Image: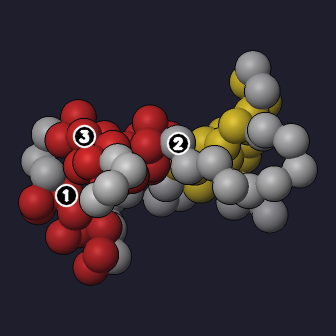
């Protein structure tokens, strides 16, 4: 993957597309992929130079990055 670069941080890794600037960060917790970190997703949305329609719509609905984090927390709230 020559167009991607990565670096490890704490308990995770961040990969960045050298041309597009798209950035994806993850933390590793055990062997499962059951954890969703809205912080990394918000950063991913912020990194997109030409977002696809779903990501573009999220950015239109939530112009402030913090609003995405709050909306995700609301969706994950028990009893919802």
Q: Residues within 10 Å of mark 1 (few under 14, many from 20)?
A: some
Looking at the rendered structure, the secondary structure element under dot 2 is loop
Which x, y percent locates residue 12? 74, 33
In the foreground, 32 or 79: 79
The N terminus: image quadrant: bottom right
Q: Which residue reaches farthest front?
A: 79
Q: List the residue tagged with mark 2.
A: 37
Q: Which residue reaches farthest bottom?
A: 53
Q: Earlier in the sequence, mark 3 or mark 1?
A: 1
Taking the image as drawn, is residue 47 in sight?
no
Looking at the rendered structure, the secondary structure element under dot 1 is helix
Q: List the residue tagged with mark 3.
A: 70
**Residue under the image location 78 percent in, 39 percent down:** 28
**Residue under the image location 61 percent in, 42 percent down:** 25
Which x, y percent locates residue 64? 14, 39
Looking at the rendered structure, the secondary structure element under dot 3 is helix
Residue contact at pointers 1 and 2, CB within 8 angstroms: no
Q: CA distance from mark 3 to mark 2?
A: 12 Å
In the foreground, 4 or 79: 79
Which x, y percent locates residue 11? 78, 27
**Residue under the image location 11 percent in, 61 percent down:** 60
**Left of 56 or right of it: where is 44?**
right
Q: Earlier in the sequence, mark 1 or mark 2?
A: 2
Q: List the residue tagged with mark 1.
A: 59
The C terminus: image quadrant: bottom left
Q: Which residue reaches farthest top?
A: 10
């Amino acid at each position: 993957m020559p167009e991607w670069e990565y670096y490890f941080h704490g308990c995770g890794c961040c990969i960045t597309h050298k041309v597009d600037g798209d950035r994806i960060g993850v933390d590793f917790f055990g062997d499962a992929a059951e954890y969703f970190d809205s912080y990394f997703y918000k950063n991913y949305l912020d990194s997109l130079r030409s977002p696809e329609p779903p990501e573009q719509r999220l950015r239109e609905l939530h112009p402030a990055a913090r609003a995405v984090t709050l909306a995700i927390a609301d969706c994950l709230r028990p009893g919802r």
